[in-house]
Amino acid sequence: GAGVSQSPSNKVTEKGKDVELRCDPISGHTALYWYRQSLGQGLEFLIYFQGNSAPDKSGLPSDRFSAERTGGSVSTLTIQRTQQEDSAVYLCASSLRGGSSYNEQFFGPGTRLTVL
Amino acid sequence: LAKTTQPISMDSYEGQEVNITCSHNNIATNDYITWYQQFPSQGPRFIIQGYKTKVTNEVASLFIPADRKSSTLSLPRVSLSDTAVYYCLVAPWGNAGNNRKLIWGLGTSLAVNP
């Protein structure tokens, strides 16, 4: 079975442009997480979806960041008016259940975003 | 929310046992402790999870004392391929409602030398 996939694997953009990052979770996984990891740093939690709902958006760094999930599957993380400090690897993870239990998270390979 | 503290880096040699300790003084009653391994340019990978005492699987053991304020990941007979960053994550189990904000530490960078 396929694991978590993310696209693009690399994205180079100019400051001020908008970008969309995509995550395809493992089929049947209801929970989906987005993280950001800067060079040499740990994981910074961004947002969590249970189904299509994101109960807690407080991890998003600013109002330039938004995320949605449709059909309980694919999720898109959008960054508007990108800034150089947005440069990082964006990781997506899914798990079989969330909310009522904490299950193992399966991570995708990440999208490396570079803002020039 | 519990926060974790781990050594920034550790060095070891092939064939040795490696123990990485994570401190989580403010762990809550419904928190579980999970360890992940991350290789360069990859997402983290689950290693082991536990609540108390000792858990063992085919790759590692996890020791959790009675007060649960720390935990120790034990890797037996490490090899060069165990060189990676190891993260300790404390997160709630059970019906945590909508609070799924997960706080990851900086991890421990383990270097296994020949």
Image (cartoon, helix red, strand yellow):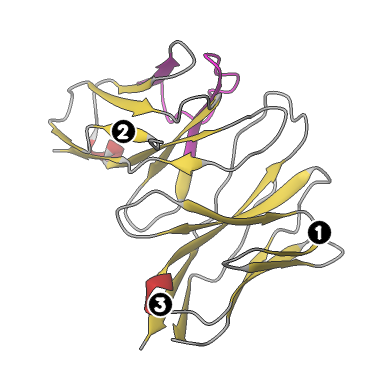
In the image, is A47 to the left or to the right of B99?
left
Q: Given the image, on which type of amino acid does mark 1 rest?
A: Lys
Tell which circle, 1 or 3, labels the residue nearer the N-terminal end: 1
Residue B52 numbered tag = 1
Residue A88 numbered tag = none
> Residue under mark 3: which chain is it in?
B
Distance between the alpha carbons at the discs numbered 1 and 2:
35 Å
Task: Note whether residue B63 is visible.
Answer: yes
Residue at left offset 40%, top offset 55%: A41
Q: Secondary structure at mark 3?
A: strand
Mark 3 surroundings within 10 Å by alpha-carbon count, few (fewer than 14), some (14 through 19), many (20 or more): some
Q: Given the image, on which type of amino acid does mark 2 rest?
A: Gln
Q: Nearer the viewer, residue B33 or A58?
A: B33
Same chain shared by disc 1 and disc 3 = yes
Distance between the alpha carbons at the discs numbered 1 and 3:
28 Å
Instruction: Check disc 2 and report the residue beneath it.
Output: A6
Residue at left offset 75%, top offset 46%: B31
B58 is higher (above) or lower (below) than B33? below
Q: Which residue lies most toward the front here?
A: A1
Locate the C terminus of chain B by quadrant.
bottom left
Q: Nearer the viewer, residue A84 or A22?
A: A22
Q: Nearer the viewer, residue A3 or B11?
A: A3
Instruction: Check disc 3 and report the residue beneath it.
Output: B111
Q: Say whether residue A87 is magenta.
A: no
Distance between the alpha carbons at the discs numbered 2 and 3:
28 Å
